[in-house]
Image (spheres, grey):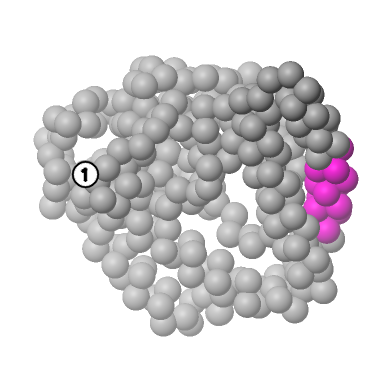
Amino acid sequence: MAYAGTKLTPLKTGGGRSFESLKEKNEPTPSTSSVPSTSEVVPREPVFTGPKSGWGVVKVECPYYSTEGRNSGKLPVGTLITYSGVKPSTKGVVLISKIQRQENTWEGPFLIEALDVVLYRGELDKMPENQISDIKAYYAIKGKIAERKEQIEEKTQSRNPYFDTAKLWQQRYAESIEKAGKMEEKANALIGPAKSKMVDELRTMKYEQVRIKTQADKEAVNYKAWKDKNPINPSLFSDDAELKALHIQLKEAKEKVKDVVVD
């Protein structure tokens, strides 16, 4: 069942990618590398032509942040969000959002990059529940496909001589970000000499974080160079039974939302 009669208006998001129609063409496939680069994205002028509030569904597994910018983890594909505002960032535009948990409770506000979400115009509470469920299910299956591909890729790329070290330094960098965030929160709650001491410790931590990031970037470059020279055999994906089953599920799910989703 398609939702031909439902008024879902596509929105344009920041960072130069626009949703011109509900069936956008040539959408790039998100990377499934198990060791992504930590290199900073060059700041660009953010553009967001949609309304300052609305709702959407997470289309790729993505990080989300506290309003202070601290990484709060990752959101699974298919997560339902509402947003009440937008703000610029070095990566384009972030949405000031609330997220729906599995228990149908809402949490927030958080910051989510606009490019990671399929956005729709209109009031969420006026949308048919079955329609929302089908949209979420469609993107959730896409997320499972990406996750399965990543599992296959990670198993294969374990032959990469830089796999372990790249993953280790990525983990260290992520831990340093989390630790620095907690230290900053603690420093903000202190006063007097105790605050000064914590600020000094945080400054030292930041210097160490730069060293960690430099090494993480170096290992990620080596990992990617080896990976590019040793591509994965496509048959590992096409012959995988779990992926085959998921693609059948995706085809069935897409039929229900073919008029209202952006691939």
Query: For this rendering, which residue is in front, 59 or 233?
Result: 59
Q: Residue at x 29, y 52 (%)?
A: 102
Q: Where is residue 96? Give x, y as percent.
A: 44, 26
Disc 1 residue type (three-letter): Ile
Query: For this rendering, which residue is in front, 31 or 94?
Result: 94
Q: Residue at x 14, y 43 (%)?
A: 129
Q: Where is residue 247? Give x, y as percent.
A: 36, 68
Tell me if 121 is positioned left or right of 164 in this view: left
Q: Where is residue 6? Give x, y as percent.
A: 15, 34
- Indicate whether 229 appears above or below 191: below
Tell me if 104 is positioned left or right of 198 in this view: left
Q: Residue at x 12, y 35 (%)?
A: 5
- Indicate whether 87 appears above or below 242: above
Q: Where is residue 180? Give x, y as percent.
A: 70, 39
Q: Secondary structure at mark 1?
A: helix
Query: For this rendering, which residue is in front, 71 or 197?
Result: 197
Q: Quadrant of residue 246?
A: bottom left
The reply to whether residue 116 is in sight is: yes
Q: Residue at x 48, y 70 (%)?
A: 148
Is the stretch drawn in magenta largely helix, strand or loop?
A: helix
Tell me if 56 is positioned left or right of 67 in this view: left
Span of residues in magenta: 207-221
Tell me if 174 is positioned left or right of 84 in this view: right
Q: Quadrant of residue 166?
A: bottom right
Label 1, on which residue? 132
- Mark 1, Cα crowd under 10 Å, few <14 / some 14-19 / many 20+, is some
Task: Report the number of numbered marks.
Answer: 1
